[in-house]
């Protein structure tokens, strides 16, 4: 005779703390947490913006020296600054201080984002994010630093063309200078994310090292085209300075993909799978 069904309370501690399925929250709980994290992020951004307002001047003049340094100006080249509208100085200060605040608060905002998505990830996914996050951030910093280091020779190269027009001078709008510098730093930072993109595509088996080697000519065309879109000036100097390191990173990525493929092959062999 079948035993009657009896409902039993689950034993305490029976859930796997590492299993996202055991930590499901209601939609309203997710929205409340998201709202709280957004509010904290906005507070940190506002604090950074306020600090940026007071340190904007030395930051701007440091960027300004990249162009106006007498030692960097070609002989015979004259450069002056001029605003177009009376409100431009205020809005420039506002923009520069905001960028400073965004950079200062970025680590805190990323931590808030990580805290929100972490409970939904499995242990392997968390491990991947712990590696990819710092790696991506490090590559962005290296790319931005590389872009910063070539700004001075880039300005010198640009200014040299003024000599082709005797009797002229450059009237530089300060806001345009800041935008150009920020675009250069952002472009190089994003360009240096190439190894992360290639590694991820290899991880999900959308590309292979053999395919990357076979299609390297196509990759060169794509990289040069991407560099042309990312660099703000679109000139040969900026294009070359971004394309060359990205090409180097492409071939470094091939080596990283080979390592990933060997590791995957060993894991599958250990689990009894055959290629």
Image (spheres, rainbow, N blue to C red):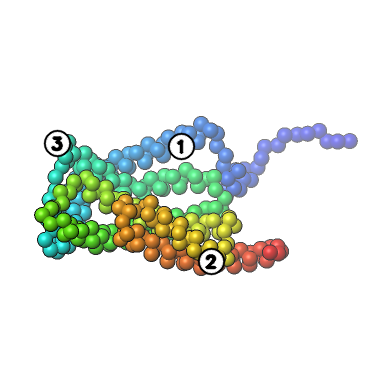
Q: Which residue is mark 1?
A: 33
Disc 1 crowd, CA 10 A, few/some/many (<14, 14-19, 20+): some
Say whether disc 1 or disc 3 marks the residue closer to the N-terminus: 1
Q: Is residue 248 left or right of residue 19?
A: left
Secondary structure of the residue carrying tag 1 is: helix
Q: Which residue is mark 3?
A: 86
**How far apart are the alpha carbons under marks 1 and 3?**
44 Å
**How far apart are the alpha carbons under marks 1 and 2?**
46 Å
Question: What x and y, as percent, mark residue 59?
Answer: 21, 52
The answer to which image quadrant residue 70 occupies is: bottom left
The structure residue drawn at horizontal position 58% and vertical position 66%, both measured from the top left corner, is 210
Q: Which residue is mark 2?
A: 213
Work out which quarter of the rendered image holds the C terminus and state it.
Answer: bottom right
Residue 108 badge: none
Say whether disc 2 or disc 3 marks the residue closer to the N-terminus: 3
Between circles 1 and 2, the one closer to the viewer is 2
Query: Given contact means CB atoms under 8 Å apart, are the residues at marks 1 and 2 in contact?
Result: no
> Visible in this render: residue 108?
yes
Q: Residue furthest right?
A: 1
Question: What x and y, as percent, mark residue 165?
Answer: 16, 56
The structure residue drawn at horizontal position 14% and vertical position 36%, both measured from the top left corner, is 86
Q: Residue furthest front?
A: 165
């Amino acid at each position: 005779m079948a035993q009657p069904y009896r409902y039993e309370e689950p034993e305490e501690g029976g859930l796997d703390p590492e299993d996202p399925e055991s930590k499901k929250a209601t939609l309203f709980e997710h929205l409340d947490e998201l709202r709280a994290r957004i509010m904290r992020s906005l507070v940190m951004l506002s604090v950074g913006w306020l600090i940026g307002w007071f340190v904007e001047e030395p930051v701007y003049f440091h960027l300004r020296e990249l162009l106006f340094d007498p030692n960097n100006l070609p002989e015979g080249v004259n450069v002056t600054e001029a605003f177009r509208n009376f409100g431009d100085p205020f809005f420039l200060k506002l923009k520069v201080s905001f960028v400073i605040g965004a950079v200062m608060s970025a680590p805190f905002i990323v931590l808030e984002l990580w805290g929100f998505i972490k409970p939904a990830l499995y242990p392997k996914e968390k491990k991947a994010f712990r590696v990819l996050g710092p790696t991506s951030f490090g590559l962005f910093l290296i790319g931005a630093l590389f872009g910063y280091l070539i700004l001075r020779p880039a300005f010198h190269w640009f200014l040299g063309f003024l000599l082709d027009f005797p009797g002229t001078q450059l009237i530089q709008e300060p806001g345009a200078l800041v935008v150009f510098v920020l675009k250069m730093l952002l472009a190089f930072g994003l360009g240096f994310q190439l190894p992360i993109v290639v590694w991820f595509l290899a991880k999900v088996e959308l590309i292979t090292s053999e395919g990357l080697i076979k299609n390297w000519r196509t990759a060169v065309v794509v990289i040069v085209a991407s560099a042309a879109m990312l660099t703000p000036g679109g000139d040969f100097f900026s294009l070359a300075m971004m394309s060359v390191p990205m090409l180097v990173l492409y071939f470094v990525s091939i080596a990283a993909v080979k390592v990933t493929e060997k590791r995957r092959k060993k894991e599958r062999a250990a689990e009894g799978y055959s290629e």
